[in-house]
Image (spheres, grey):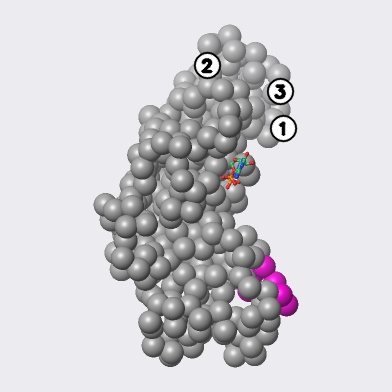
């Protein structure tokens, strides 16, 4: 379990991470979602002791990362896939890691196979790797000691759809065997298929957190009409809270019944009326981040 309490990082007057608290439970994949510059990497660096927090604490299994004996064997970390030594081959990098951690040599071959790097690729220098291959190598390195906790910053960056599918299976397997997985992403759709729980961060602050399914529930009603303006006028007149959705729709913070009634009373013909749940994390994400930019809080029950 990873526990973060009131973690803050200031650079001068600027708060890169602003009083965030969350828990990543074991047996689950926790997605850390936010636009670029939201503070994800800074938070992860603080969790693994690479950046000292201005205030607050982060523990893994109840202890600070730096107090874990031989932490590399307990916690698999991938913070920057491009940070590998470009002049070494993938195999050399894994071999060095396994020697440092005192692991048997065959672990390197096991991991190369697991992450789908061929024998030929493993003998190529990392400077000739694509970003996707570097990610796979970084994952292999993080998994070398078979750790129970994985902390991965943007691991799906550069992976093709097949790679993302593979990553999903890998992280699911880690969670199912009781592991704790924290992965960050600014890519909504990728994290939507991978994560069980979500922490959404914007401008250094947590905007929402909880089980993905819970967060996706109760996001109001999606309604569309040919006469978009008339529908907007009717919703406004009925004092319903709403945001624009695409070119001809609205997401309304009310039930489909209520929205249907308002439209009927205003004699606006609808082309679509439904719960806006489904799996539209993008809607949730965009509304949340735009709300943060305006400095207000998104009104959902699971807010942090
Ligand atoms: P994310 O990982 O979500 O893209 P980061 O954690 O990398 O975001 O960055 C959050 C904010 O903190 C950004 O505005 C970034 O420019 C700033 N930042 C990160 N590291 C430093 C640093 N060492 N000095 C000053 N500002 C920093």
What secondary structure characterizes most of the magenta part? Answer: helix
Q: Is residue 283 above or below residue 173?
A: above
Whether ligand 1 has any atom under 8 Å from the Cβ at mark 1 is answered as no
Q: Which residue is mark 3?
A: 227
118 sits to left or right of 247: left
**In front here: 85 or 1?**
85
SS label for mark 1 = loop
Whether ligand 1 has any atom under 8 Å from the Cβ at mark 3 is answered as no
Q: Quadrant of ligand 1?
A: top right
Q: Work out how far the residue at label 1 is from the one at label 2, CA to CA, in angstroms.
A: 19 Å
Part of the protein shown in magenta: 127-133
Q: Which residue is mark 2?
A: 240
Residue at (40% x, 77% y) in the render: 101
- Depth check, mark 1 against mark 3: the one in front is 1
Q: Are marks 1 and 3 in contact (CB under 8 Å)?
A: no
Q: Which residue is mark 1?
A: 247
């Amino acid at each position: 379990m990873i526990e973060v309490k009131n973690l803050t990082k200031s650079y001068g007057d600027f708060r890169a991470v602003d009083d965030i608290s969350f828990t990543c439970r074991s047996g689950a994949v926790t997605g850390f979602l936010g636009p670029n510059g939201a503070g994800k990497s800074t938070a992860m660096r603080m969790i693994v002791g690479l950046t000292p927090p201005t205030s607050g604490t982060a523990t893994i299994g109840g202890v600070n990362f730096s107090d874990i004996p031989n932490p590399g064997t307990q916690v698999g970390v991938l913070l920057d896939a491009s940070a590998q030594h470009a002049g070494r081959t993938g195999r050399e990098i894994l071999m060095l890691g396994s020697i440092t951690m005192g692991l048997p040599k065959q672990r390197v071959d096991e991991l190369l196979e697991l992450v789908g790097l061929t024998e030929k690729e493993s003998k190529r220098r990392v400077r000739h790797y694509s970003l996707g291959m570097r990610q796979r190598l970084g994952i292999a390195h993080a998994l070398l000691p078979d750790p129970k906790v994985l902390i991965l910053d943007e691991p799906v960056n550069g992976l093709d759809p097949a790679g993302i599918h593979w990553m999903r299976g890998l992280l699911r397997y880690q969670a199912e065997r009781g592991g704790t997985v924290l992965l960050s992403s600014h890519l909504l759709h990728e994290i939507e298929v991978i994560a069980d729980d979500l922490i959404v961060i914007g401008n250094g602050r947590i905007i929402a957190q909880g089980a993905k399914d819970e967060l996706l529930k109760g996001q109001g009603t999606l309604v569309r009409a040919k006469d978009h303006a008339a529908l907007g006028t009717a919703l406004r007149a009925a004092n319903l809270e709403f945001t624009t959705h695409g070119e001809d729709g609205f997401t309304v913070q009310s039930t489909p019944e209520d929205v249907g009634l308002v439209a009927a009373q205003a004699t606006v013909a609808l082309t679509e009326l439904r719960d806006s749940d489904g799996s539209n994390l993008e809607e949730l994400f965009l509304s949340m981040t735009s709300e943060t930019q305006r400095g207000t809080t998104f009104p959902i029950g699971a807010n942090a």
